[in-house]
């Protein structure tokens, strides 16, 4: 069954934009968030990555505005594979 995952042809572009969105956060949080979002989106699926972002919003690590931008980015760079 096909699942919505990160489009690996646009991998570098996605990572660059993800870095741009997270650059306001402290260095330690930034790195772990970036790695987790990328790994979940490319290996598990976009839904899991979205749930992770929402979980971090609930924990107070990121705000509503940033969470929405991250989720929009995930869906923009996803394909069924």
Image (spheres, rainbow, N blue to C red):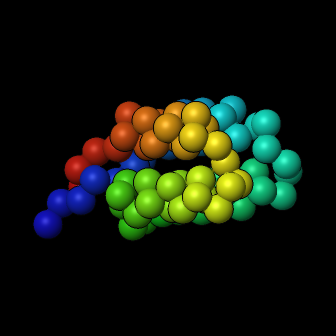
Quarter that holds the C terminus: bottom left
Q: Quadrant of the N terminus?
A: bottom left
The reply, left or right, for residue 3 in relation to residue 31 is left
Give the residue drawn at x 53%, y 54%.
Answer: 53
* Left/right of residue 70 with respect to residue 50 in the rendered view: right
Dividing the picture into quadrants, the one containing residue 2 is bottom left
Does 47 appear above or below 16? below
Residue under the point 77% across and 37% down: 23
Residue closer to the observer: 52 or 40: 52
Residue 37 is at least partly visible in this image: no
Q: Hey, which quadrant is residue 31 in on the image?
A: bottom right
User: At x 79% / y 36%, what residue is drawn?
Assistant: 24
Q: Which percent across, then down, holds residue 25?
A: 79, 44
| Most foreground residue, 10 or 1 | 1
Count of numbered circles in the view? 0
Q: Residue at x 44, y 54 (%)?
A: 50
Query: What percent of the width, then of the height, locates residue 75?
Result: 37, 40
């Amino acid at each position: 069954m096909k699942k919505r995952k990160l489009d690996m042809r646009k991998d570098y572009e996605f990572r660059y934009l993800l870095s741009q969105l997270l650059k306001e956060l402290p260095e330690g949080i930034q790195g772990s968030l970036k790695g987790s979002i990328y790994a979940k989106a490319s290996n598990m699926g976009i839904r899991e990555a979205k749930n992770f972002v929402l979980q971090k919003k609930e924990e107070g690590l990121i705000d509503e505005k940033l969470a929405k931008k991250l989720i929009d980015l995930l869906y923009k760079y996803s394909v069924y594979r």
